[in-house]
Amino acid sequence: MIQKLFSIFAFVVLVTSGVQAAPAPDSTVLEVFMTGIGAGKVKLVGVFGDQNYLADSAVVDANGHFVIRRKSPLLAGYYYFLMQSGKNFSVLLDHNEQFVTIRTDVKDFVGTMDVKGSLNTELLYKNFRFQSGQDAELQQLAGVLRNSDANLPEFKNAKARQDVLLADRKKHLDETYATYPNSFFTKFKIAGQNPELVDFRKPNGNLDTVRQVVHYREHFWDGFDFNDDRLLYTPVVGNKLRRYIKELTPQQPDSIIKVADAIIRRVMPHKSYFKFFSNWIALQYENTKTTVMDGEAAYVHIVKNFFTPELATWDKPENIEKLRKHVGEMEASLLGRKGPDVVAKDQYGQSKSIYEKTAPIIVVFMFSPDCEHCQKDADQIQQIYDKWKDRGVDFYGIAVNTTDKEWKDFLVQHKFTFTNVFDPSNRAIYAKYYVDITPELYILNKDRIIVGKNLHANQLEEVFERQLKKL
């Protein structure tokens, strides 16, 4: 498994010659006066990538006053105070903003927020207030644009007004950037901006959506400063990376690999981003976590190319080697690869091979008798075999994680009549057809190329029809 991205920090109490050391002065003091909250507890929640973590907590007195005191400073980043009621408000803190006083009202955080000691939080709420003044009208205009014909006057008027408001929003941010060019807020906001859509047209005048998306994706990271590790501790990185990989990239193995490889190589000189991007993207396509057909091809590619002892320095070399061995076992059974032959003994002690079968289509069915889903699918698998055995489809069953008796009892119970084999040593199937969760179904075509995998029983016949048409 890929190493988790977070560490647990431990506090160490220093004792010298039996005398406790003098307490260190506070490195961080966040003091909040909040009207309308009442007594209780509050959590300070931080952000890393696309995850949240508990940074600290405090007790709120009856007057709505609470203080976060720390001996170690907070990391620069985006935080939010979470109340017991579920309400929350955010702060944006730089390294040198560790002594902050906030006054606000629980009924209107944005409108009443008064901040001392954090310019970046001040700028954050200045921007919140500007946007909130536009939001209601922008929502109303969006409804008109969504429900009106583009040729009608109300659509054109709504579009013109929307353009004015968005231009005002951009002007507001540009003025802030110009006044505070080196602020964390400026880096944070610029990093989160999306590129403008370019109106590319085909020769016939129609919108060229493919070129538009490609251009948008190519410029998606413009303005993002990968030299600034502070941005990893804001929602920007997780949100942008998820959209870039999951929404702007076609969810097909070849497309995912191409886009993922390029962005990981782009951030390689920036160690913190290289670690996060390579881990995050790989985990999205781990075989138990992806719904993309053969999504694990992206997982294999990333581990093979970027998880080496020389590059993945965040983990021990022996752990990296185990991970690489793991993906090596997966690689042989990726889509488009030649399906490996398996030779093992059936319930009668006869050696049976996948390659000795002559049907144009072979289904490799891997199952475990004590697997609940295997028990549920078994009868349907036999029915599908009976329906298709004279139409160019054959089955080859492989039992795993079982005993000889359990396997044979399972075959009798479900009246399997297609070839079934079992190798207690697993040598016959090692590094051939990867199985993590049973049942696992692979489909081989006439050239014994893997054309289907990670399928459910009810998806088999659709693949059979498609492959037989090709013949």
Image (tube, rainbow, N blue to C red):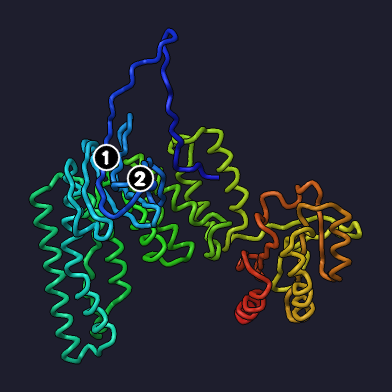
Q: State whether residue 249 is above or below residue 37.
A: below
Picture coordinates of residue 463, whole percent (x, y)? 62, 75
The reply to whether the C-beta atoms of the residues labelled 2 and 1 are less than 8 Å apart is yes
Image position of 58 (left or right of 172):
right
Q: Quadrant of residue 146?
A: bottom left
- Residue 186 in sight from this viewpoint: no
What's the residue type where badge 1 is placed? Leu
Residue at 33% x, 53% y: name it: 235
Q: Nearer the viewer, residue 439 or 255?
A: 439
Residue at 73% x, 52% y: name it: 429
Q: Nearer the viewer, residue 394 or 347?
A: 347
Q: Residues under labels 2 and 1: Cα distance?
A: 10 Å
Q: Which residue is mark 2?
A: 44
Q: Which residue is mark 1?
A: 30
Q: Name which of mark 2 and mark 1 comes first in the sequence.
A: 1
Q: Quadrant of residue 364?
A: bottom right
- Mark 1 lies on a secondary structure that is strand
Picture coordinates of residue 106, whole percent (x, y)? 28, 56
What's the residue type where badge 2 is placed? Leu
For the C terminus, give its image quadrant.
bottom right
Residue at 44% x, 9% y: name it: 18
